[in-house]
Amino acid sequence: MKIHHFDLGPCRPLGGRLMDGVSPGLVARITCHCLLLETPAHGLVLVDTGFGLRDTMRPTPRLPGWNLALLRARMDPEHTAIRRLKKLGFAPSDVRHIVLTHLDFDHAGGLVDFPHATVHLTAAEAEAATDRRSFLDRTRWRPVQWGDTGRWQPVETRLGRRGGGETFFGLRNVREMQGLPPEILLVPLPGHTPGHAGVAVKGARGWMLHAGDTYFNRDEAHGDGTPPPLVGAYERFMADDITAQRESLARLRQMLRQPVADIAVFCTHDPVEFVAMSAWSESDYAPPIAADGGEAAAEVS
């Protein structure tokens, strides 16, 4: 399985290192880290879709204006899944499955660009998103992005609903998905949204876990547990249940401390993790040689 890493929602909020932990100036960098999986027998699989083509061409009223202004999202059609696929020589119809960490507007915008793909998500996320009860719910979940919800394949991951489920490096209630190989798993990590999940993928170098928005900055999972103050404040504001989110993050940190946890874990919005994971995955394959004799750049936006 070949794995591509795409930034399908680059943002440049103000705040510098107070937002992303690394930028020296006033402007920070926030990514929307999505995956394209080339599977041998199941076609192309997207893990999250970032902003969609229609989002970039007409952000309002499709998307929440105050979020876009705060994050200073770059509405660039070239940073959409459909355009990135076409550059690789694929057609939209080649995408047969989409696996969502959750349905937030910056993760599900491209659903309508791939109308023939089966969409896999947790049952809890599907139920909560269709209810949209609170102001935050109506802000984060945008039905105009979804297309035909009849192609959704909700997966029950809640404890007690379908037994104890399988475990994955100590994480509970992990599920396989119908029509997808066992090398792609849905890992419940609720809190950011009611049905938020990670997506585990086994590639040439072993397992990786796309942890979605379980955390926003690498220090939360791999460091001292404290995010930069501005991104931490945004993370708390956007959490559906901050206690549940912290519990999910605690489980990730416990897993990463285990000597046998031979797994790469990354989130959606950390720019350092995005660059590191792009290079890590690309090192499995012999890169083309550029005309000047150097290696061609990896597929990093």
Image: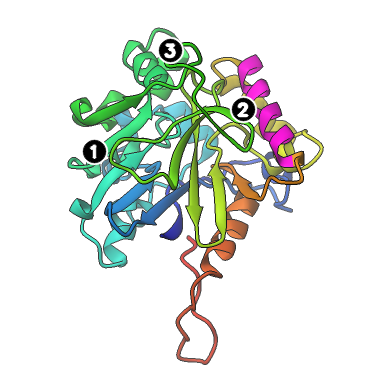
Q: Is residue 60 left or right of residue 196?
A: left
The answer to the question of whether label 1 and label 3 lie on touching residues, with beta carbons closer than 8 A, is no
Instruction: Depth check: give the residue in front, 167 or 131.
Output: 167
Residue 68 placed where, x, y %?
46, 34
Amino acid type shown at disc 3: Arg
Which region shows up in magenta? Answer: 242-256
Instruction: Give residue 112's mark.
Output: 1
* Location of residue 106 by image quarter: top left
Instruction: Give residue 161's mark.
Output: 3
Instruction: Depth check: give the residue in front, 274 or 24.
Output: 274
The N terminus, quarter of image: bottom left
Does the magenta segment cover residue 253? Answer: yes
Amino acid type shown at disc 2: Glu
Farthest-out residue, top: 133
- Crowding at dot 2, Cα within 10 Å, few <14 / some 14-19 / many 20+, comes out as some
Q: Is residue 281 left or right of residue 134?
A: right
In this figure, which residue is indicated by the disc labeled 2? 235
